[in-house]
Image: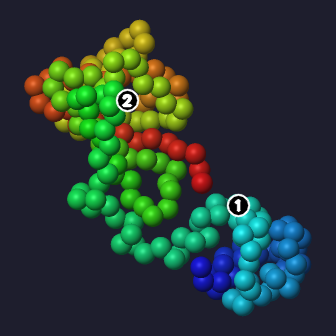
């Protein structure tokens, strides 16, 4: 990590909040000398110092490193998409679409479900929220005691812990795009 990026973030935050170096160091619990060194790009912060700074700035620790990540590394090419098979879901294949290199607070998956197949013999239950968009075909989404037909272009929001599964009654593969929330890192 380039210390001058961190120093610029600290200086910008201090100016916006009209804080002196002494005020900022008190908020972080680090010395004024270290804050001054970091702003000038000559300090070498420990992990605990970086955590304290991130907490004070109100950002994730990983966001302090974002400037070091190339834009190219934020692209995931089709050939590099992770193929995910669930042994309990014989007709379903998932593709991991979320680009790296940092963990994200959202996950993007594309499901391909064979004709006349279901995602699960039972019901799926996730502890994160997800939104499903029907990109190709028609599907039936089954909740425990209800079912709904969704056509191409339809979207469904699946709340955390809501038991569900998808069925493909059609003659072509079903394509569903999932956007899942994840815990912030």
For the N terminus, which image quadrant?
Answer: bottom right
| Nearer to us in this view, 134 or 13 | 134
Give the residue at the far top of this rendering.
Answer: 145
Q: Element at badge 2? A: strand
Q: Which residue is mark 1?
A: 58
Secondary structure beneath disc 1?
A: loop
* Picture coordinates of residue 8, whole percent (x, y): 66, 81
Q: Taking 102 as reference, is 71 above or below it?
A: below
What residue is disc 2 on?
Answer: 156
The residue depicted at 53 percent of the width and 75 percent of the height is 67
Kindly identify the residue that appears in the image at 58 percent across and 72 percent down.
Answer: 65
Q: Residue 77 lies in what quarter of the image?
A: bottom left
Callout 2 environment at 10 Å: few (<14), some (14 to 19), or many (20+)? some
Does residue 153 appear in the picture of this structure? no
N-term-proximal mark, 1 vs 2: 1
- Residue 2 vertical position relative to residue 120 in the rendered view, above or below: below
Res. 96 mark = none
Q: CA distance from mark 1 to mark 2?
A: 32 Å
133 lies left or right of 129: left
Colour scheme of this structure image? rainbow
The answer to whether residue 144 is above or below residue 36 is: above
Asked whether the viewer can see residue 36, the reply is: yes
- Quadrant of the snapshot with the C terminus: bottom right
Task: Count the marks.
Answer: 2
* Rendered position, 127 above or below 123: below
Q: Position of residue 154 (x, y in %)?
A: 29, 31
Indicate the quadrant where residue 46 lies: bottom right
**Residue 106 place in picture, x, y as percent:** 47, 48
> Residue 52: percent from the left, percent from the top?
77, 66
Name the residue rendered at 62%, 70% in the picture.
64
């Amino acid at each position: 990590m380039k210390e001058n990026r961190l120093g610029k973030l600290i200086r910008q935050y201090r100016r916006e909040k009209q804080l002196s170096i002494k005020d900022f160091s008190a908020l972080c619990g680090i010395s004024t000398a270290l804050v001054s060194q970091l702003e000038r790009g000559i300090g070498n912060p420990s992990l605990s110092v970086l955590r304290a700074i991130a907490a004070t700035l109100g950002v994730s620790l990983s966001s302090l490193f974002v400037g070091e990540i190339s834009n190219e590394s934020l692209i995931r090419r089709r050939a590099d998409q992770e193929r995910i098979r669930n042994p309990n879901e014989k007709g379903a294949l998932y593709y991991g679409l979320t680009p790296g290199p940092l963990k994200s607070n959202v996950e993007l998956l594309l499901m391909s479900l064979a004709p006349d197949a279901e995602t699960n013999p039972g019901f799926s239950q996730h502890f994160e929220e997800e939104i499903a968009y029907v990109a190709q075909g028609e599907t039936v989404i089954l909740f425990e005691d209800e079912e709904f037909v969704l056509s191409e272009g339809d979207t469904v929001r699946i709340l955390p812990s809501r038991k569900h599964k998808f069925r493909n009654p059609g003659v072509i593969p079903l394509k569903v795009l999932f956007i899942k929330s994840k815990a912030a890192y």
